[in-house]
Amino acid sequence: MSFVLTEDEQMLRDSARGFLAEASPVSALRKLRDAKDPVGFSRELWGQMAEMGWTGVLVSEDHGGVDMGYSAAGVILEEIGRTLTASPYLSTAVLGATAFNLAGTESQKSAWLPKIAAGETVIAFAIDEKARHAPEKIDTRAVADGNGFRLSGKKRYVVNAMGADVLIVAARTEDDRINLFLVDPEAEGVERTARRTVDSHVPADIVFDDVKLTGEAILSGAEDPEAAYRLLLDAGRACQAAELYGAALQAFDVTLDYIKGREQFGVSIATFQGLQHRAAHLYGELELTQSLVRRALTTLDTQPSQAPLWCAAAKAKATQVARLSAAEGIQMHGGVGMTDEYDIGLYYKRAQAAGEYLGDDAFGAGEVARLSGY
Amino acid sequence: MSLDTFRKETRAWLEANCPEAMRKPIRSEADICWGGKNWTFASQDQKVWFERMVEKGWTVPTWPTEYGGGGLSKEEAFVLKEEMKAIGARSPLDSFGIWMLGPALLKYGTHEQKLEHLPPIARGEIRWCQGYSEPGAGSDLVSLRTKGELKGDRYIVNGQKVWTSYADKSDWIFALVRTEPDAPKYSGISFLLIDMDQKGVSTKPIKLISGKSPFCETFFDDAEALTKNRLGEAGQGWEIAKYLLSHERAGIVSEAAFGGLNPVTAAHQSGEVEEDGRLSDPILRGDVARLTIDGLAFDATMRRVKEEADHGEGVGARASMLKYIGTELNKRRNELNMSALGYDGLLWEGEKESDGDPARSWLRSRANSIEGGTSEIQLNIVAKRVLDLPSA
Ligand SMILES: Cc1cc2nc3c(=O)[nH]c(=O)nc-3n(C[C@H](O)[C@H](O)[C@H](O)COP(=O)(O)OP(=O)(O)OC[C@H]3O[C@@H](n4cnc5c(N)ncnc54)[C@H](O)[C@@H]3O)c2cc1C
């Protein structure tokens, strides 16, 4: 296990950083927002990500991917976080690919993984039904119906759902266990309502009203579907943590630049100890976050059975620190920090939204306590 | 020898040689073996463990064998540490000689100085203390005034040090002394090794809030230090002091990160747990979980920084970050221990020697963010040297 990036990962980071700064700077998010884009992300950009191989980092070479693992996915998400890029990367390339890898049958893998790698599909993941993340509180039901199922229930804040080609839905089967189902968002009985959130993303609330599914719709390749479901969420947490870390780091960098340039009382405000100490404290928190995120990702790659604790810890820490970094950023910017024109506020909003997703810091702390046995 | 073989052999050796009693977590100061001329072991097991480790050179595993060390590579030393941790083995010997002076001697000492001073440190024969702080020079250490006048082959030292940990139990002191009064502040200080067993050196204990007196005022009254016991050049003291401080900080941090009571164990002791093992107080449980997260993050960061240092990035001023985080974390852990223990944590004296340990440890931990440079000083260093923020 290593904290230091491999050469391939370093190259990936450099190219991701260069590409996103060019193709998807923060102004790209502003544009989507101001144009009230109906899906909230750019399909064109998604195609470009696929061309560079990013969408296939968790797809095996047999299925057309590059199979670089979670560590590499984290590298990309960190850069996505830095630029606040809105994309279906987490829901498709991470959660989608992981769902098929862990729970897909061979034929489902052959059908979907190549599409993910090629950037030909966008997947949205429908889990939560409550205001706060609660992956065990699933009331959506999939009742057997001939060879297939009938799906009913309500999902909330499904990320990227308005632009999705397919939904993966967590639902309880008659044995009361949680299983994952592939659902066509255009199918009869599916109703999506766009929700515009504070971070300028466009998730959707979805109602499933007796939706007819074939027997192929269930991801039935896992021995224990609930264990697969949990590990899938853990992987999602670690990767979401990587994005949050990237956002936190960028908010910090932007703030340092600002305070170095801003003068008051005839001197650079960066000379003030009141600001220096908070910046130095924040630096330490960012270093802690980086270590946890790297640790969670490499553990997923090398010892998945050990991963849950690290993933929960990483998500909790990244959530807390991203919020802190952006909040301190606003404060240190002073008045302009409150203006829409400056980017720092966008980081604060994204930290809150991405922080909530798959469980915030309080949720993560609860998981850590449970997994530690106290 | 391959690392795997080394690991196997080390594991077997530890299994055979580490007494059962030395595999229990350190509860208090009394469990620590400091060594020195007047050292008396707390138990037969402590003595046996100490002697066996000394023989292997494993009190200082990476020092060269000719200086009493184990001659291990960094990787082997790490394996040794992991294997010791795996069975909960206590450190056989702790001392300022190992943590601080040793590394400075290895870097700045002549071969003769190393031969004279390192083996006695490795074998726990000579106990050292650190004479940096003075009444008027704490955070602003460079303003120190204790002076040393060169007379022939020796310095005549006069002045006062303060907060000298364990000065009354130490045999020698490494001290910062102003020897070049006309030189600029930073280049007038020399690093002297002074034998405390002489008429001109005296100490007076200072009592702490923890009820203990681990440190002293130290007075030099025409004390003598041979020039051969000056480390480095005359006037090079500040550079050496800073190098040594980075080791001191690392030492304080690793001490803070290891062992001792933790809030979950504390809650079990005070009976504040449910049948399923959950802590009874949900808010305390949340606080403990957040501490766990930061603890995991801190351990991972220590490992990452080490790994990056091995890849040539160096630790540098990040040592200050680690010192700051590690010590603040240790204070938080002690505070939560006290919460988890409730009234039981308040005990100060009782029938058993260990009664009052949690409270003393809690009080002692407040010093973590003062000794070795305060948290504020560490933050200053990070701001200036890592983040490159300008000085006023
Ligand atoms: C348990 C313990 C053991 C010790 N052992 C030893 C030892 O063995 N040998 C030895 O030489 N010394 C030892 N010390 C001394 C220790 O290094 C000093 O106490 C420490 O460096 C702080 O100096 P001071 O106590 O004079 O505080 P001061 O320097 O007076 O500081 C007081 C307060 O002002 C703050 N402050 C000072 N300067 C700044 C600044 N520039 N920016 C922001 N805040 C500032 C400090 O952070 C602190 O909060 C020990 C101390 C303790 C508590």
Image: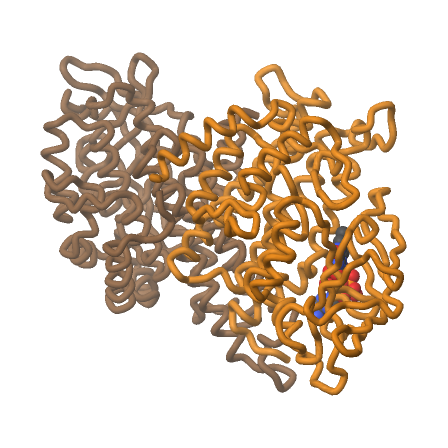
Within the image, what quadrant is residue A266 found in? bottom right
Looking at the picture, tell me which residue is in the foreground, A373 or B190.
Answer: B190
> Residue at point 47% right, 50% down?
A289
The residue lying at 41 percent from left, 48 percent from top is A354
Q: Judge from the rendering whether residue A224 lies leftward or rightward of residue B274; answer left or right.
A: left
Q: Nearer the viewer, residue A363 or B360?
A: B360
Of the four image quadrants, the one with ligand 1 is bottom right
How far across and down, in percent of the image, does residue B41 sit? 74, 34
In the rendered image, the vertical position of residue A158 relative to residue B186, given as above or below: above
In the picture, the quarter occupied by the C terminus of chain A is top right
Q: In the image, residue A35 lies at what x, y percent?
A: 29, 63
Can the viewer see residue A275? Answer: no
Residue B167, placed above or below residue A168: below
Q: Position of residue B276 (x, y in %)?
A: 57, 17
Residue at image position (61%, 22%) is: B20
Q: Is residue A166 visible?
A: yes
A45 lies left or right of B335? left
**Which chain can be seen in brown?**
A
Residue B184 sits in quarter:
bottom right
The one nearer the camera, A347 or B115, is: B115
Please give the name of the residue rendered at 79% of the width and 75% of the height, measured from the top-left corner: B148
Q: Chain B is shown in which shade?
A: orange
Which quadrant of the figure contains the N terminus of chain A?
top left
Observer-nearest of B355 and B97: B97
